[in-house]
């Protein structure tokens, strides 16, 4: 039964990812923490592990068909994400779970405020 709940969470995150270009940080991580009682570290690691397969492939295909993808920029971003993810994960390990959760929360609030009030 729990596997179905995880599948539903993935489905919702996928819909949000396809709709808004987000999912892991803004949908999946809070759900894993508050509904599945994971630690911040576990939720972040699980979210990253879920991105290993080409989960965005079908959504990206739709955007590509509509002419909304710049392949060259996407390749540079992907490479940066690949390398940056390694260093970000290394930086996160020594931070306590409660502090990491607070940093994550502040980041999400600041992004939301900027998106809402920004130009």
Image: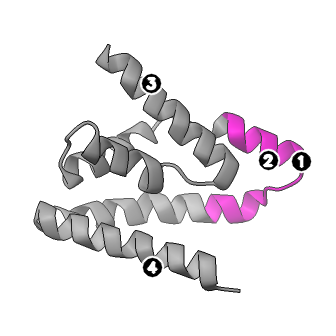
Q: CA distance from mark 4 to mark 3?
A: 29 Å
Quadrant assignment for the C terminus: bottom right
Q: CA distance from mark 1 to mark 2?
A: 5 Å
- Whether tag 2 and tag 3 are in contact, CB under 8 A, the answer is no
- Residue holding disc 1: 66
Of callouts 3 and 1, the N-terminal one = 3
Residue neighbourhood size for the residue with mark 1, other residues' Cα within 10 Å, grouped as few (<14), some (14–19), many (≥20):
few
Of callouts 4 and 2, the N-terminal one = 2
102 sits to left or right of 68: left
- Residue holding disc 4: 110
Which residue occupies the foreground of this view, 81 or 106? 106
Helix, strand, or loop for circle 1? loop
Q: CA distance from mark 3 to mark 1?
A: 28 Å
Residue 48 visible in the shown view: no
Helix, strand, or loop for circle 3? helix
Residue 2 location, x and y as percent? 30, 19
Residue in view at x 62 percent, y 84 percent? 117
Q: CA distance from mark 4 to mark 2?
A: 27 Å
- Whether tag 4 and tag 1 are in contact, CB under 8 A, the answer is no
The magenta segment:
58-76
Q: Is residue 70 magenta?
A: yes
Mark on residue 63? 2
Most distant residue in the top direction: 1
């Amino acid at each position: 039964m729990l596997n179905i709940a995880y599948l539903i969470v993935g489905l919702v995150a996928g819909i949000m990812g396809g709709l808004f270009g987000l999912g892991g940080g803004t949908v999946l991580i809070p759900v894993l923490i508050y509904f599945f009682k994971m630690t911040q570290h576990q939720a972040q690691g699980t979210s990253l592990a879920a991105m290993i397969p080409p989960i965005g492939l079908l959504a990206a295909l739709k955007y590509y068909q509509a002419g909304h993808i710049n392949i060259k920029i996407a390749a540079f971003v992907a490479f940066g994400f690949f390398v940056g993810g390694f260093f970000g994960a290394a930086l996160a390990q020594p931070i306590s779970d409660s502090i990491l959760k607070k940093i994550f929360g502040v980041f999400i609030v600041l992004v939301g405020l900027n998106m809402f009030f920004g130009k």
